[in-house]
Image (cartoon, rainbow, N blue to C red):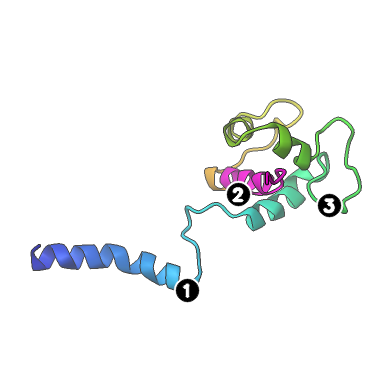
Amino acid sequence: MTTISLRRAAATALPVLMLTISGVAPASAASAQLGLSLARKWCSSCHTVEAGQSPASDKAPAFTEIAARRDDKWVKTWLENPHPPMTGITLTHIEISNLNAYIKSLAPKTP
């Protein structure tokens, strides 16, 4: 490897290494905690998004029900192309990933 190649490799790897050491996840990593924050803000008026929340609506499924019945791909597709009555909601890919991570965190644990 040439000196220039080594410098390029170090310049690419160093930021990732620093984030790993610091405990900060790269921006591309989905965050269930950020997903919960989004769910509280945008979803909780219709969906029950967390334990202890009063039932929001009998027409929208609780997030625990979605987590138990749907896979990641279905949730992602639904959030990318919401159907009525969710038509006013537009989420970024990162927000979708975070919401999906939160919903996935609610799925029943298999032994």
Residue pointed to by mark 1: 22
Q: Amino acid at mark 3?
A: Ala
**Pointers 2 and 1 in contact (CB under 8 A)?**
no
Q: Is residue 30 above or below residue 63?
A: below
User: Going by the picture, which residue comes out furthest to the left?
Assistant: 2
**Pointers 2 and 3 in contact (CB under 8 A)?**
no
In this view of the protein, which residue sits in the foreground, 5 or 81? 5
Q: Amino acid at mark 2?
A: Asn
Assess disc 3: are there few (<14), some (14-19) or many (≥20) residues with their C-alpha within 10 Å of its C-alpha. Answer: few
- Residue 60 x, y percent position in the rendering: 82, 33
Assess disc 1: are there few (<14), some (14-19) or many (≥20) residues with their C-alpha within 10 Å of its C-alpha. Answer: few
Secondary structure beneath dot 3 equals: loop
Residue 59, image quadrant: top right
Give the residue displayed 70% in from the left and 39% down from the top: 67
Q: Which mark is residue 98?
A: 2
- Residue 3 x, y percent position in the rendering: 10, 68
Secondary structure beneath dot 2 equals: helix
Q: Is residue 108 above or below residue 20?
A: above
Q: Amino acid at mark 1?
A: Ser
Give the residue displayed 81% in from the left and 40% down from the top: 47
Residue pointed to by mark 3: 51
Assess disc 2: are there few (<14), some (14-19) or many (≥20) residues with their C-alpha within 10 Å of its C-alpha. Answer: many
Magenta stretch bounds: 95-111
Q: Is residue 74 magenta?
A: no
